[in-house]
């Protein structure tokens, strides 16, 4: 792609800087940074407004029109605030922890394309899922560092809770994605589907997984081409893997420490958990990282299950090879992407307003006794069905898999309520036994001589 | 630092003993000061918890951070002047506190209270009970991590406070009861507004119930947690919803009726299970029952004067008395001794929050840290009444 070819290293460097790839890199980098940082700010405001709407109140109202500038004011306040460190903290760890927490969040976005053009070119995209999963595991280090170095018992407990929780939920989180990756390897090379590396070789790149959810062939009818090129909702993986969609999303809730899994910073128990001793911009960095995490989980869900940034007109316009229409197409893609991500983030907020918090042991139980078997079972089902239906055309396999998964999804909803009820009953057992030991009905207390009020 | 440890060692006697028993990898018991500034200690209660991991092995409540000497203040105020200070005892149910105090004074003086005033007291008392229970339920769910119920509960409570404002001029410290009656008659259209509010409240309670009751996370957090068996409840002298949730049918409004409760039948809400969930259920049922009682009071509201004529300087005859009502938290008793003067010679409150709090260390032992807030929230204590 280099414009000119040169000999010495200086010229080569110059030329690589002057390349189109580099321009794309710069655009993507700036867009991603912009997206991460503004998205957090917007999400905070959206959360406050949506929660207010659900709770019959107004939310922020006075800063700017309809309170829209509230988070801007908050950020300015946080930037200007004094950065307090308590005297007995482990200073180095304490100061570095927020960076350790937020760096992987921003790095994760390297593999997430925002539109056909706005993506980092080259190798990082190909490693997609693995890179993202690795980055989300690094997060927990920052949390433990913060919890340990704060020299505060609440922080310590919050940090340890976070460690246990994030490590436990990492497994169902990753396993839920394996089903989709397996599907891509089944579909690779089938008619209508892309063939990335060869027949039967799947992909872990987000943009390629996205292309596996697109089977449109050009028909020549402009209206249909415009709408459906790259956008075929009937092939989205949510239709064949609804259970994994739900599992990934639930694990994502836990991974990002959102309610009902917000034990590490459970306000009513641990004050603010590992955030307790932080103030000013360091606190804001944790906050930013958390909302960034929320965006990442939503974005990954959008790519893997909801067709990513595809939408009516995107590929049609970018395929016209015109600068103007390409630009419009990219903006459209960004719009669809943001729409899907924020729709999923809305569910995050909705869950927060609705549900109380789990207890630590119930949280672990949910991960290891329910989510792990479910995700492992899904992998087995995907593979078994493939072998059983290898004689049939691929659409038969997809339909059967979809039906099985939807049935499993309904079963999952029942299973969850059944399991919680059983465990609750088990927890209740001592109380019930104690109750049985006492007399079934306690006689009413004998009436003492009531002193009558001399009125009436 | 050393002083801190001295303070701690005063509360912990099991630590060394415990550590000697431990074999293998040494695990250290952690001492955690929960409060007095903590989001879920409902004010300024301080719990000194000793934790083994997240399991609570011991708990010592430290109270007194909100002591204002209300009993002593009552002894230094004329009988009428003390009413206002009763508002601050259990600051979530001032109407009930005032009723207890004026009831005691009336009993001491042998005053007749007009029937209309009695019904007005019943109406305001039941509304206050609804308000108090709404706060109890809302903050309980907030302790458990659900954000919405508390705001819905406070929205409904706001309606009650607005009605009180129209009645006594103040939302919170109403200062509405008087020895011998009440301060004002209901303003014009107040009863109509009250009825409209009750209708709305009933609808809102349905919503709240739908949001909370039957939620699996809520059930698994509260069912079987903090079980109090009936004998234990009696031994600790628990009263109110705490007692009735343990299966003992005891309600001052029924068993020792006072004022208009002699004429209005109350259905005491009793449940058998005795855990946190049951205590929540009993409170929700009591709200519904109170709504019914309010309607009954409005229907049966008699005419006539709202207060007996009392001299400006009240003088109670020599003697002592104990008068107890069913407050939102349990039996709220006022014990007065009069030496024949204008001031009570001795005033003593039997605050249900204080008595109910005593069972907390017993309940917490062996539970997880998260259950601490679940159990403590279910006690529904108000520190204003505990410390007085």
Image: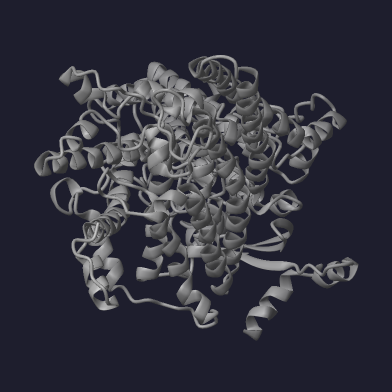
Its colouring scheme is one colour
Q: Residue at x 61, y 53 (%)?
A: A167
Q: Is residue B106 visible?
A: no
Q: Position of residue A108 (x, y in %)?
A: 42, 55
Q: Is residue A29 left or right of residue A203?
A: left
Classify B103 as above or below A89.
above
Classify A224 as above or below A327.
above
Q: Position of residue B258 (x, y in %)?
A: 55, 31
Which sits in the foreground, B267 or A92? Answer: A92
| Picture quarter with the N terminus of chain B | bottom right
**Residue A404's image quarter?**
top right
Q: Residue at x 53, y 50 (%)?
A: B382
Q: Residue furthest left?
A: A324
Which sits in the foreground, A315 or B150? Answer: A315
Q: Position of residue A409 (x, y in %)?
A: 56, 23
**Residue A37's image quarter?**
bottom left
**Residue B226's image quarter?**
top right
Which sits in the foreground, A220 or A139? Answer: A220
Q: Residue at x 60, y 51 (%)?
A: A165
Q: Residue at x 69, y 80 (%)?
A: B6
Q: Is residue A146 left or right of residue B165?
A: right
Q: Position of residue A241 (x, y in %)?
A: 51, 27
Q: How many marks?
A: 0
Q: Is residue A402 left or right of residue A389?
A: left
Which sits in the foreground, B14 or A452? Answer: B14
Classify B347 as above or below B163.
below
Q: Is residue A4 visible?
A: yes
């Amino acid at each position: 792609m280099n414009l000119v070819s040169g000999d010495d290293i200086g010229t080569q460097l110059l030329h690589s800087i002057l390349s189109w790839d580099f321009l794309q890199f710069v655009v993507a980098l700036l867009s991603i940074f912009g997206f991460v940082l503004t998205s957090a700010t917007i999400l905070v405001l959206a959360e406050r407004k949506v929660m207010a709407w659900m709770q019959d109140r107004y939310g922020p109202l006075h800063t700017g029109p309809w309170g829209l500038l509230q988070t801007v004011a908050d950020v300015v306040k946080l930037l200007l605030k004094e950065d307090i460190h308590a005297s007995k903290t482990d200073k180095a760890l304490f100061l570095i922890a927020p960076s350790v927490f937020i760096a992987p969040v921003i790095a994760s976005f390297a593999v997430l394309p925002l539109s056909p053009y706005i993506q980092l070119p080259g190798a990082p995209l190909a490693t997609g899922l693995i890179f993202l999963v690795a980055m989300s595991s690094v997060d927990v280090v920052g949390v433990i560092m913060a919890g340990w170095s704060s020299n505060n018992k609440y922080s310590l407990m919050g940090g340890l809770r976070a460690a246990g929780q994030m490590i436990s939920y990492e497994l169902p989180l990753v396993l839920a994605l394996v089903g989709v990756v397996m599907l891509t390897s089944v579909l690779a090379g089938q008619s209508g589907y892309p063939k990335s590396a060869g027949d039967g070789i799947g992909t872990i790149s987000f943009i390629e997984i996205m292309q596996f959810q697109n089977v449109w062939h050009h028909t020549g009818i402009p209206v249909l081409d415009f709408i459906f090129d790259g956008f075929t909702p009937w092939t989205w993986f949510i239709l064949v893997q609804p259970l994994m969609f739900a599992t990934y999303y639930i694990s994502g809730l836990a991974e990002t420490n959102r309610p009902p899994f917000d034990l590490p910073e459970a306000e009513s128990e641990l004050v603010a958990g590992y955030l307790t001793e932080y103030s000013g911009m360091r606190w804001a960095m944790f906050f930013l990282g958390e909302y960034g995490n929320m965006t990442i989980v939503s974005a990954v869900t959008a790519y893997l299950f909801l067709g990513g940034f595809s939408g009516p007109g995107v590929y049609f316009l970018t395929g016209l090879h015109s600068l103007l229409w390409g630009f419009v197409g990219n903006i459209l893609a960004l719009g669809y992407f943001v729409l899907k991500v924020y729709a999923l983030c809305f569910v995050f907020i909705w869950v927060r307003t609705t549900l109380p918090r789990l207890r630590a042991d119930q949280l672990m139980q949910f991960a290891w006794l329910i989510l792990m078997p479910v995700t492992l079972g899904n992998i087995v089902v995907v593979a078994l069905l493939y072998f059983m239906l290898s004689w049939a055309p691929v659409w038969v396999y997809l339909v059967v898999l979809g039906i099985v998964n939807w049935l499993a999804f309904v079963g999952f909803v029942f299973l969850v309520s059944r399991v919680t009820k059983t465990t609750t009953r088990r927890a209740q057992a001592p109380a019930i036994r104690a109750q049985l030991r006492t007399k079934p009905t306690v006689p009413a207390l004998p009436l003492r001589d009531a002193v009558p009020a001399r009125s009436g | 630092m050393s002083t801190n440890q001295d303070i701690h060692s005063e509360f912990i006697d099991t630590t060394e003993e415990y550590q000697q028993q431990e074999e293998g990898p040494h695990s250290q018991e952690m001492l955690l000061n929960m409060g007095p500034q903590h989001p879920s200690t409902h004010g300024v209660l301080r719990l000194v918890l000793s934790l083994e991991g997240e399991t609570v092995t011991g708990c010592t409540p430290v109270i007194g951070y909100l002591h204002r000497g209300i009993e002593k203040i009552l002894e230094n105020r004329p009988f009428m002047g003390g009413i206002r200070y009763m508002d601050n005892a259990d600051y979530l149910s001032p109407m009930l506190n005032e009723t207890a105090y004026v009831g005691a004074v009336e009993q001491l003086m042998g005053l007749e209270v007009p029937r209309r005033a009695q019904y007005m007291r019943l109406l305001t008392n039941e509304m206050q009970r609804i308000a108090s229970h709404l706060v109890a339920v809302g903050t309980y769910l907030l302790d458990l991590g659900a954000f919405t119920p508390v705001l819905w509960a406070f929205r409904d409570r706001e309606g009650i406070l607005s009605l009180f404002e129209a009645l006594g001029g103040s939302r919170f410290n109403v200062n509405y009861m008087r020895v011998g009656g009440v301060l004002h008659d209901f303003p014009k259209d107040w009863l109509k507004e009250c009825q409209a509010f009750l209708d709305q409240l009933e609808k809102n309670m349905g919503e709240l119930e739908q949001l909370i009751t039957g939620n699996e996370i809520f059930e698994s957090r509260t069912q079987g947690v903090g079980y109090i068996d009936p004998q234990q409840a009696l031994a600790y002298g628990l009263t109110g919803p705490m007692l009735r949730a343990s299966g003992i049918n005891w309600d001052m409004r029924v068993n020792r009726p006072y004022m208009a409760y002699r004429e209005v039948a109350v259905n005491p809400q009793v449940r058998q299970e005795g855990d946190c969930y049951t205590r929540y259920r009993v409170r929700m049922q009591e709200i519904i029952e109170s709504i019914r009682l309010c309607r009954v009071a409005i229907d049966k509201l008699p005419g006539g004067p709202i207060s007996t004529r009392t001299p400006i300087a009240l003088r109670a005859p020599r003697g002592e008395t104990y008068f107890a009502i069913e407050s939102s938290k349990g039996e709220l008793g006022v014990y007065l001794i009069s030496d024949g003067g204008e001031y009570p010679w001795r005033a003593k409150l039997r605050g249900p929050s204080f008595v109910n709090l005593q069972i907390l260390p017993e309940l917490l032992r062996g539970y997880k840290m998260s259950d601490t807030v679940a159990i403590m929230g279910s006690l529904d204590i108000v520190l204003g009444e505990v410390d007085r």
